Image: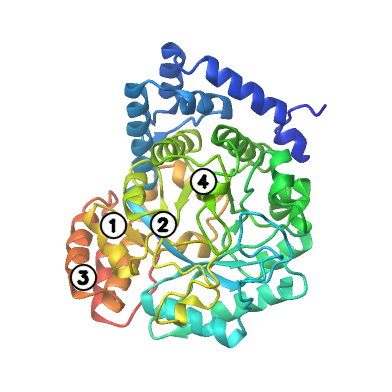
Amino acid sequence: MAIYNPKSKKAEEFINHEEILETLEYAEKNKNNVELIDAILEKARPKKTEHSFTCGGLSHREASVLLACEIPEKIEEMYKIAEQIKLEFYGNRIVMFAPLYLSNYCVNGCVYCPYHAKNKRIPRKKLTQEEVKNEVIALQDMGHKRLAIEAGEDPINNPIEYILECIKTIYSVNHKNGAIRRVNVNIAATTVENYRKLKEAGIGTYILFQETYHKESYLQLHPTGPKHDYDYHTEAMDRAMEGGIDDVGLGVLFGLELYKYEFAGLLMHAEHLEAVHGVGPHTISVPRIKRADDIDPNVFDNSISDEIFQKIIACIRLAVPYTGMIISTRESESVRAKSLHLGISQVSGASRTSVGGYTETDRPHDTEQFDVSDQRTLDEVVRWLMETGHIPSFCTACYREGRTGDRFMSLCKSGQILNCCHPNALMTLTEFLVDYASDETKKVGYALIEKELEKIPNEKVKKIATQNIEDIKNSNRRDFRF
């Protein structure tokens, strides 16, 4: 029997089944232990130091106790602390991005994804470089600056050379005032050599969802194809980091397996990356299974309610305070609105989950990977965020200034967000307002920017940011950054 060891690079040892079962048993036994719950909440609470705030974070076992807790006033306290952590370390910024689907050719048999190899109903499509360029122009015309590229696993149709060529094409497109400044990559687990190639191509974050950490369920849900190899898939982030990629993004597909198991496994994976590589995940995503083509989410009997979903988000924020958290357009406007107060720091906007979907006037459904619940335009999402007191940020400065991995984490921990990320967010928001926004959105945005500039503590930074914003408004200058 494998022994739990977060410093091991063997999947069965750092995601240890027996450790998860013991954790769940411990959490169930202590779910109403008020003294223990109070101690855990106190540990999670941000502490003010001379120049900033610090946050201890929680172990997978401590966070699992909170997730199991059924005491209403303690759950409410969790939510308040989660929002406090979000505001202390990320401010009221919400980073904007969009997925770009390159190809839906896939050799895997994943039973929850319409791209599975046996699906003969779905039209298979792979973008040419000219089509990639046109998709990028369509995204730039909305105002996007950050993309997450997606492709099925198919060594013939989607080899690493194709992905690298697409990245090169994306970065090469400059249209009017538009430019994609950061390309994140969500493709199948691969080799250290291929991760090095992705790093050399200038990618931002490498994202790979585990889908489920429960090995037995994983093997059943991935019956055929290279993704069937649980260990190879689960150990991918170690290979990515060995290949020089220091920003990696984790996630599970909630609804495939019991959520408490997934939650513990997800945090154990984060602890493992911290223990081995000195830095945890750059982001954690929280997708829930959704309807798509021949996929009926009701077939999976582990679906979670909106209330449980929000509790998961809050508990992740308490456990990993310095990690970005992503919610996609899988979720409705109302669910996304509540989640913003529980720790979410990145949202997608105006997403199309079909191959070639952005150049189509009407949203195509025949090649969608999943149903999109929030179908608002980017302008509408940006205005909604501002009206609810958030700053939509199109900033990619840290990635382009080399502040990735542990360097970004130290920036976050030192409390310099207000002197760095905050003004960068305001400057990129100004770009969006000048170049892409409707009159109504501009009105809301300029009023917000004026108010938010006053929050910058460093007077020199405030003065420079204010001048840069005026230059963006009154000249064709773009891409200022701290």
Residue 385's label in the rendered image is 1
- Which image quarter holds the C terminus? bottom left
Query: Image height check: is 167 above or below 91?
Result: below
- In the image, taking residue 394 as reference, residue 284 lies left or right, namely right
Q: Residue at x 51, y 46 (%)?
A: 409
* Residue pointed to by mark 3: 442
Q: Residue furthest right?
A: 1
Question: Label 2, label 4: how many angstroms apart (C-alpha)?
Answer: 20 Å
Q: Neighbour class for label 2 at 10 Å: few (<14), some, many (≥20)?
A: many
Task: Tell me if label 1 and label 3 are in contact, CB under 8 Å.
Answer: no
Does dot 3 land on a helix, a strand or a loop? helix
Which of pointers 4 and 1 lies earlier in the amino acid sequence? Answer: 1
Q: Quadrant of residue 269?
A: top right
Question: Label 1, label 3: how many angstroms apart (C-alpha)?
Answer: 13 Å
Task: Tell me if label 1 and label 2 are in contact, CB under 8 Å.
Answer: yes
Q: Nearer the viewer, residue 149 or 427?
A: 149
Question: Label 1, label 2: how many angstroms apart (C-alpha)?
Answer: 10 Å
Does dot 4 land on a helix, a strand or a loop? helix
| Three-letter code, disc 2 | Val
Task: Tell me if label 4 and label 1 are in contact, CB under 8 Å.
Answer: no
Which of pointers 2 and 4 lies earlier in the amino acid sequence? Answer: 2
Q: Residue at x 57, y 29 (%)?
A: 60
Does dot 1 land on a helix, a strand or a loop? helix
Residue 474 lies, in percent from the top left, at 23, 80
* Residue pointed to by mark 4: 409
* Residue pointed to by mark 2: 347
